[in-house]
Amino acid sequence: QLGQLNKLIQLELDSTQLSGKIPSEFGLLNILTYLDLSDMSDITGSIPTELGQLQSLTDMYIYENPSLTGTLPTQLGRLNQLTHLWLYGQAGISGTIPSEFGLLSALEELYLYDTGIAGQIPAEVASLTLSHAWLHGNSLSGAVPAFDNSLLSELYLHDNLLTGTI
């Protein structure tokens, strides 16, 4: 039913006792710029791929939801207006960081820590003009890619399985 509110610009459902899956119909909220589905201990399932259709979205906060599972949708890489992507504190999220996240050209803050993600940090993500990249507390492995970004003020990589030289 919330997916039918086509004039909605902001949707904040954080810190509620709402339960169930994140509706795929949220992808129909064409002019939505702000989405906060954080700290909702009773939501289940995975992050819907349809959220990649929210072309006006600048802020996505889906964190501290311990019952969310699945992988990070590659379709989120289509959100070219997105400046804040906070997906942390979800141990049930697995897989890798999609290289498509490197298409998020407006992204400033990537908070993707304390999850079940593994694999290497994609070079495409390291090349973004981020100010904050918090990727700690995962199972990321391999070498640290070159973060050649003069705007990067916070880079957290601790508590991973990274190897190579500094």
Image (tube, grey):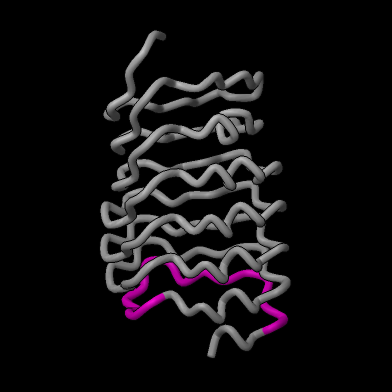
Q: Which residue: 64% across, 21% down?
A: 149
Residue at 37%, 25% in the rendered image? 142
At a point 62% along the width and 29% down the height, the residue shown is 127
* Residue 88 x, y percent position in the rendering: 38, 48
- Asked where in the image residue 54 lies, by quadrant, the reply is bottom right
Q: From the top left corner, tell me how far across and down residue 159 is, in percent.
A: 27, 29
Instruction: Say if 5 sits above or below 74 in the image.
Output: below
Q: Which portion, as a residue range, is magenta?
A: 6-21
Q: Residue at x 66, y 19 (%)?
A: 150
Q: x, y percentage for residue 89?
A: 32, 50
How many callouts does the rendering have?
0
Give the prevailing secondary structure in the magenta stretch: loop
Q: Looking at this view, is 83 or 101 the one in front?
A: 101
Q: Is residue 50 left or right of residue 115?
A: right
**Residue 125, located in which quarter of the rendered image?**
top right
Q: In which quadrant of the rendered image does the C terminus lie?
A: top left
Q: Is residue 108 magenta?
A: no
Question: Which residue is nearer to you in this view: 56 or 10?
Answer: 56
Left or right: where 25 falls relative to 16: right
As drawn, 144 above or below 63: above
- Does 166 appear above or below 26? above
Using residue 132 as the reference point, say whether residue 165 is left or right of it.
left
